[in-house]
Image (spheres, rainbow, N blue to C red):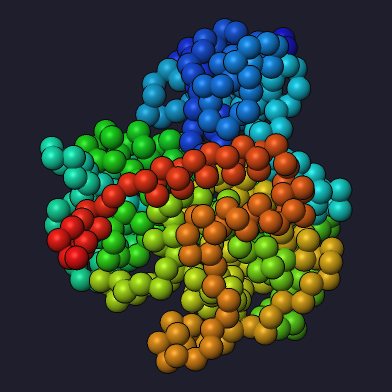
Amino acid sequence: MSVYQETMSRLQAQGIHSVLVQFCDIHGVAKGKLVPLTNLQEWVEQGSGFAGPSIWGTGLPRFGARSEYYARLQLSSLRPLPFMPGVAHGVADGFAGGQALDTCSRQLLQAALARIQARGWTLWVGIEPEFFLLRQASTGAWQVADAQDQLDKPSYDLKAIQRNHAFLDDMRASLTALGFELQQIDHEDASGQYEINYKFDDALAAADRYMLFKQTAHALAQKHGMVFSAMAKPLAQAPGSGLHFHLSITDADGKAVFADPTGALGLSAAGHQFAAGLLAHADALSALCAPTVNSYKRLAVSYSASGTTWSPVWKAYGDNNRTCLLRAVAGRLEWRLPDASCNVYAAIAATLLAGLDGIDKHMSAPTPCDEDLYERFASGAPMPDRLPRDLHDALAALEHDAPLRAQLGESFCAQFLLLKRQEWDAYQQQVSAWEMARYADAF
């Protein structure tokens, strides 16, 4: 019996008749289609076909052999979806004309990982998803789904968890069934904001798992009459949602490359060099890790109604210091720049490549920060350099960071810059309610 027949028999025994072939567009949004399980070999070896130009960021033409996008299913990724009876979920890589597509972000990450695999290293990533539960009113206005969730300081609010336990418990049950090893569920710093933590994994599996997390959350929030939102900052006077990456590398013997109990911040020389690479490329990384106009409403020195903000505005690193862009903790690095709207594959790939550049060039990191940067800012003291203040400046930084672009992939970066500049231009053409209120009759 072939591996395809074995897999089909196993899934059919579980009541599976269809496969949801899922890939990721350049914006980090899951796309795909339902196909019959009985054609499993075709989906793996040839792929499921899509019109290439209909997918954001492929760069494929409207005709010819390379106009068709083929999503090649990864057989080992198949697992039944608890919220779609009879359907198994499978991750796919993008191909065109029989060749791997150089604008496929999942394969971008695999290419970046090959650089450390050649050294006998493995990148481990723990992802911390923060998100909002919203509802759209009949007027079209967006609001927090739980109208009672209005505490001045809502962090760890148990009453909100109790009111929304049906959704949260559905998430627990579904994620557990999908193989997630859950660690905690809590109410975060903003009204309607939650965080669900689960165990770290190797980088590619971690990225795949986050995509599956979002699909699960979208489906279950809708079931409960709510909207799962990965928008970076939906509430003006509240903290936004981050997607922090906890990064560590082990060598061929399983030894932690970043950790040194005797070193500053508990980091080895390689750990400090990796940190230096992240800080050196931070402006360009902002475009990929914080890729929307709204992302820079989160990355701002702003007042929070809860009295707490952890926004990583300044390019600094420190020991368990959440006011820094980069936090050293327990011999690993927490990269606090990404938000939940990023393409997780591209963001991890670019982060890894920037850190490796620091190691390969023996970069020196700045002096570690041992103070609250928000208190320092309030005092008027000189500050570390800031991240870009908006998407326009972040895109310019990515365009000017030729070494990072070359390592990540020029084709992907060209498509990304093209689409994101269009997004910025569309935003610039809007006239907001704030502008009308401030200027309409002012002059």
Residue 138 position (above or below residue 261): above
Q: Quadrant of the N terminus?
A: top right
Horizontal relation, residue 183 to residue 334: left or right: left
Which of the 4 image quadrants contains residue 60?
top right
Which of the 4 image quadrants contains residue 224?
top left
Q: Nearer the viewer, residue 243 or 180?
A: 243
User: Going 28% across and 50% down the picture, which residue do you hit?
Assistant: 431
Residue at the extreme front = 443
Work out whether residue 316 can be spotted: yes
User: Going 59% across and 73% down the picture, which residue do you hit?
Assistant: 315
Q: Nearer the viewer, residue 372 or 435?
A: 435
Residue 211 position (above or below residue 46): below
User: Going 45% across and 65% down the picture, which residue do you hit?
Assistant: 299
User: Going 51% across and 13% down the picture, which residue do you hit?
Assistant: 35
Q: Position of residue 106 (x, y in %)?
A: 64, 37
Q: Position of residue 438 (x, y in %)?
A: 21, 63
Residue at the extreme right = 119
Q: Nearer the viewer, residue 329 or 141?
A: 141
Count of numbered marks? 0
Q: Position of residue 126 (x, y in %)?
A: 57, 56
Residue 34 position (above or below residue 199): above
Q: Quadrant of the C terminus?
A: bottom left
